[in-house]
Image (cartoon, rainbow, N blue to C red):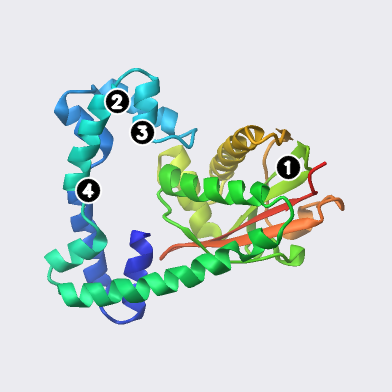
Amino acid sequence: MSVKFFGQFLLERGKIIRQELLDALEFQKTINVKLGTIALDAGYLNAEQVESIRNQQMTTDKLFGEIAIEMKYLTTEQLEDLLLIQKNERISLGDALVQKGYLNLSELEEELKQYKKQQETYETKGQYAIVKSLNSEIPQTFVDLSIKFLRRMVDINVDALESHNDQQKIAPYLWNVCQQFYGNSNGMYILSLSEKPLLKIASGIAQENLKEIDELAKDGAKEFVNTVVGNTVSKLSHKGIKLGLKPPEIYPSLGHIHIDPQCSQTASVKLSSAEYEIQLSIVYSPLS
């Protein structure tokens, strides 16, 4: 369940006001401690090891604990101990709202029921274009890892809300970060977004607050896409789909993007949070 989405849902229904949501989110952050911090406090890891794991995590879809075990910094038993501590210290947004007095338990129960119904509708809409596509494992893998990396690398907590198969609508926003792939399928990954989410992504990669779309911001956005697409290609290779990559590019409009006529398959998915909207499109040829 997306914390930001549930908060937006409550705002739209008039159950809380924006300041109450922000207050609850800040309260939640003080309770929800990152696994690396817990490991540091427990004496299982030192600061250098935590930073090393986090740096590795920025370029892979693996979890902090998985990497720690692979690097032999933690044992399986130690990780289980840390996850138990983290679980006991973690609270949901709903819990935070109740503890802050902005909702009572009966109100929370009812809102969660209504929210779940809405999410089920969104999930159906978000999967529609993928289900309609040939070789659906290709767009599905791209979408899954895009969502995972947006959440993990740049703190944009999105979900897929709706989708379509119209190649004429693959780039609805001004900025389009693209990367071509070739091999068993030829195609292109297109991340279409406005200035605000582009700067959020680029700032997350650069680890500094970027305020304008300059070359540093563009490079950050391209690096993010290259990480997502590279990991997707690696995952698809385990399914027997072999793909190569060309360097990512960024264009200020769809007019500059050349789509190979062989790319008869299109799956576009709208990714949204309370603050950002992004469209991810995969155009590709059927598997050879």
Identify the mark at residue 76; answer none if there is no mark: 2
Q: Earlier in the sequence, mark 1 or mark 4?
A: 4
The residue shown at (58%, 62%) is: 127
Q: Earlier in the sequence, mark 3 or mark 4?
A: 4
x, y percent for residue 147: 50, 51
Identify the mark at residue 34; answer none if there is no mark: none
Q: Mark 4 or mark 2: which is in front? A: 2
Query: Which residue is identified by label 1?
Result: 180
> Would you say 33 lies left or right of 234 here?
left
Res 203 → quadrant = top left
Query: Which residue is identified by label 4?
Result: 32
208 or 80: nearer the viewer: 80
Q: Residue furthest right?
A: 261
> Would you say 172 lies left or right of 54 here?
right
**In the rendered structure, which amino acid carries the disc numbered 3?**
Phe
CA gap, disc 2 to disc 3?
13 Å
Q: Residue furthest top?
A: 72
**In the rendered structure, which amino acid carries the disc numbered 2?**
Thr
CA gap, disc 1 to disc 4?
39 Å
Res 153 → quadrant = top left
**In the rendered structure, which amino acid carries the disc numbered 1?**
Gln
